[in-house]
Amino acid sequence: MARRAVGLTLAIALTALGMAQGARAQSTDPYTAGYCEPDPQTKLLYTNRAYLILPKKPDSPPLYFSYQILETGKLVQRSGQFLFDDGDDRWELESNPDALRLFWPLRPEKKLELNRVERTTGAHSQVTFVVLGLEPLAVNGVPYKSWKIRRLDTVEGGKGTVQFLWYAPQLCTLTAFTDSQGRTVRLLRALKPGDADYGREVVRKNRRLYFADTGEMVK
């Protein structure tokens, strides 16, 4: 009887240990977000700007994709979801070119540090990303779990600037971000060809986006 009791106690203890280990494994990594990009021809309408995602070139690096600013027609090259060029190709990575790829999948408290150099002036810059956690953000009335990321840019000899980014895996893009003045820019619509309002032109007035045909504010 004593042996049976010891065996039963041991079995319960091992089961409890296994359950605890499983719980710890799940709690340390409750969510992850893999890398993805918006489909070509997707239109992203934000509070004060609009983008058209362009087909990816065959020779593009793994995380790069391009879009067109609808109001101006300017082409922009994105170096992944959290770094982008303004069309002037000013910055290039100094070291660790695989760091952007290794930043994915996103996890709480994950950190990335990059060093960049400005092509024309030679100024050095450090960019640091930290994954803060998940926040629900609504796009066209639908809530999406969005990963909040803090970005700190420190230019050599200058002050650091802080930006926040929210990335939604379901949409493969940013649901919101803060601009250079600290204002939050939100994604209002993610339109595919054939969707209602896809073919309507948009204009920007007083730092807001409107449909050109009716003057109606994009919501």
Image (cartoon, rainbow, N blue to C red):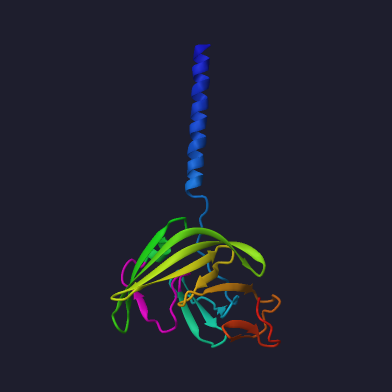
* Most frequent secondary structure within the magenta stretch: loop
Q: Can residue 139 be seen here?
A: yes
Give x and y (percent) for residue 204. Answer: 59, 85
Tell which of 64 and 5 is nearer to you.
5
Check residue 15 for magenta coloring: no
Residue 188 picture quarter: bottom right
Question: Which percent across, then down, holds residue 69?
Answer: 54, 83
**Residue 83 is inside the magenta segment:** yes
What residue appears at the point 34 percent right and 74 percent down from the top-left corner?
A: 159
- Residue 137 against residue 65 in the figure, above or below: above
Q: Quadrant of residue 154?
A: bottom left
In which quadrant of the rendered image does the C terminus lie?
bottom right
Q: For the point 60% across and 62% down, which residue is it?
A: 144
Measured along the vertical axis of the image, is residue 208 above or below residue 160? below
What is the x, y in percent for residue 56? Answer: 51, 75
Q: Give the range drawn in magenta.
A: 79-97
